[in-house]
Image (cartoon, grey):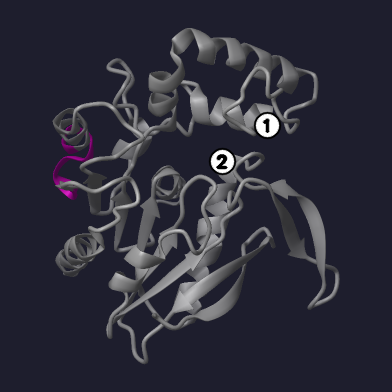
Amino acid sequence: MTPAFVVEIVTPKKFVLKGLWFKPKKPKQAIVFVHGLGGSAFSMLPTVSKLVDAQTAVLTFNNRGHDVVSGLSTVGPFKRAWRPRRYGGAAHEVFTDCVDDIEGAITFVRRQGIKNVFLAGHSTGCQKSVYWAYKKGRGVKGIILLAPVSDYAGALERHGKRKLERVAKAARAMVRSGKAHELLPRSLWPEGPDDAQRFLSLYTPQSVEEIFSYIQAAKAPRTLRSVKVPMLVLWAGNDEYSKRPVKAILDWFEWNVGKKGTVAVVPGVPHRFGGGERVVARKVKQFMKECYP
């Protein structure tokens, strides 16, 4: 068991996020860990615990997409007062809000006196990490992408193009009628719950969230290519959310991250890297060492 401090993060837009701060006595570097779709600060603790050492602190926190449905709070009119804002969670979050969430988490770490900060995302947290870098540019030493699966590609494999297009048509109609945050009917989309705007963000090919477009040969992944800092991409060898050949996905990432990226596979592990946590930690720490001048 690795002890941690329970912390509150206030983002630049004054949203309040809960987190776990794993901090040794005198860390020289820190990792801000962004969980995946419907996850939480607790989702990847077996991996997080292996990343913490005498020199490395880790902040894992609930972003606005934590769990399935969650209440969001902002700082109230008084210093220690909180007031409810709206619903979040995997069903209701707005993808682009991730920039504010991650900026708040990075700022928290810097205020602890740690200058060498790395950003790590797991699953949909990878899209959020890359999108933050696209919007904010530099500000971290490097970015670590763990199991960067395309949610659109996975849904396409499970349901087929016609089904997704039919649901997307209904979701767009809901958005136009002012029902962007109403849940899609279960009869139409039993995989949910997802509200209309969330479905369009996750499961349509031209969404800003469809950053890892390895299933779309004609789409240039400009958001991914825009990242200037070094990147480490680790793919889970037995990822249950992707049916595509591992080599094809690794080739796609190698081509699109270029010389600034390192791409590797952790063989024989599922999406959450169960059983491969030590391998992940070893590769991440080696990458971090290589990022220093």
- Residue at position x 20%, y 42% in the image: 237
> Is 260 on the left or on the right of 161, as rendered?
left
Choose between 277 and 249: the one closer to the eye.
Answer: 277
Q: Nearer the viewer, residue 260 or 217?
A: 217
Q: Position of residue 209 (x, y in %)?
A: 47, 34
**What numbered label is drawn on residue 95?**
2
Residue neighbourhood size for the residue with mark 2, other residues' Cα within 10 Å, grouped as few (<14), some (14–19), many (≥20): many
Q: Main secondary structure of the magenta part?
A: helix
Say if 155 sits above or below 63 in the image.
Answer: above
Residue 195's label in the rendered image is 1
The quarter in which the C terminus is drawn is bottom left
Q: Secondary structure at mark 1?
A: loop
Q: Crowding at label 1, few (<14), some or many (≥20) Cα neighbours within 10 Å?
A: many
Identity of the residue furthest to the right in this view? 77
In the image, what residue type sits under mark 1? Asp
Secondary structure of residue under mark 2: helix
Marks 1 and 2, how far apart at CA: 12 Å
Depth order, front residue of 70/126:
70
Above or below 230: residue 199: above
* Residue 138 placement: quadrant: bottom left
Q: Is residue 33 above or below residue 36?
A: below
Residue at the spot 37% in from the left edge and 60% down from the top edge: 119
List x then y, in percent, for residue 291: 20, 64
Image quarter (top left, top right, bottom left or bottom right) of the N terminus: bottom left
In this rendering, position of residue 39 left or right of residue 8: left
Asked if residue 153 can be seen in this view, the reply is: yes
Q: Which range is magenta?
A: 254-262
Question: Residue at position x 22%, y 40% from top?
Answer: 257
